[in-house]
Each structure stands twice: as C-alpha cells, then as structure tokens.
Image (cartoon, rainbow, N blue to C red):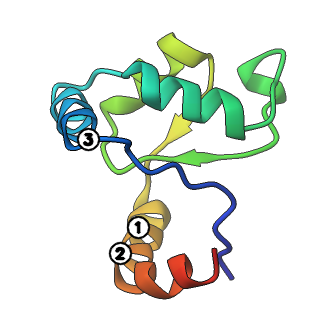
Amino acid sequence: MVKLAAYQPFTTAEEALENIMAIRDLKVTPTLKNFLVTHLPATKSSKSQKFLLGIADPKMGQEVFSETGITASFNESISELNRGLRTHFVSLMKSK
C-alpha cells in the first residue's frame, strides 16, 4: 500500500537538531526545501499538482507553499497514514 520513494538522512546531529527546531517553529529549512523540490514532480501551479503532500501539522502547510509553491494537506486520512508509517518505519527502511 505504501512504498518509500525517497529518503535523505541528516549528515550530522547538528543538522538534524537545526531541522527539528525549525519545524517546531513552523519554518522550512534549506534541507527540507531541497528535499521537496528534488523528489516531488515540478508543477506550473498548485492547481495542476498531481500529487498530495501530506503533513502532520496543518499550520506548516502555508510555510511549505510559500517557500516551494507546493500545496500541502492535513486531514484525518493523513493522520492515520502517519500513524501507520511510524508503526512500520523499520520494515519500510529495510526495503530501501
């Protein structure tokens, strides 16, 4: 049902902490922006976007859109998907 398409580990503990703190403050870091732009298909406008970027915090969607032009969504289905991903993360990583 779910297949891991892209994964980018942090290179240092400092980079990981910087990204965690930025996400907590609802900011898009250069690392996150680069990851999203690199691994998601380019679209001319958010209306022609042929994918759905699910996020865990609905407030983060506005920041992602303003930094990348990518529309992000938060709803109950995405919450359940995130729960499943956390539960099965180890087995998903083994397939990568």
Location of residue 56 with respect to 14 vertically, above or below: below
Q: In the image shown, does 92 or 85 lie closer to the viewer?
A: 92
Front tag of 1 and 2: 2
Which marked residue is nearer to the observer: mark 3 or mark 2? Answer: 3
Seen from this angle, which residue lies furthest top?
66
Q: CA distance from mark 3 to mark 2?
A: 18 Å
Q: Earlier in the sequence, mark 1 or mark 3?
A: 3
Q: Which mark is residue 86?
A: 2
Horizontally, residue 24 falls left or right of residue 92, namely: left
Does residue 6 lie above or below 48 as drawn? below
Element on which disc 3 rests:
helix
- For mark 1, give the secondary structure: helix
Q: Amino acid at mark 1?
A: Asn
Element carrying mark 2: helix
Marks 1 and 2, Cα distance to the nearest angstrom? 6 Å
Residue farthest along the front direction in this orientation: 12
Q: Which mark is residue 82?
A: 1
The quarter of the picture where residue 1 lies is bottom right
Task: Determine contact: label 1, label 2, CB under 8 Å.
Answer: yes
The residue singled out by tag 3 in the image is 16
Q: Where is the C terminus found, in terms of image quarters?
A: bottom right
Residue type at tag 3: Ala
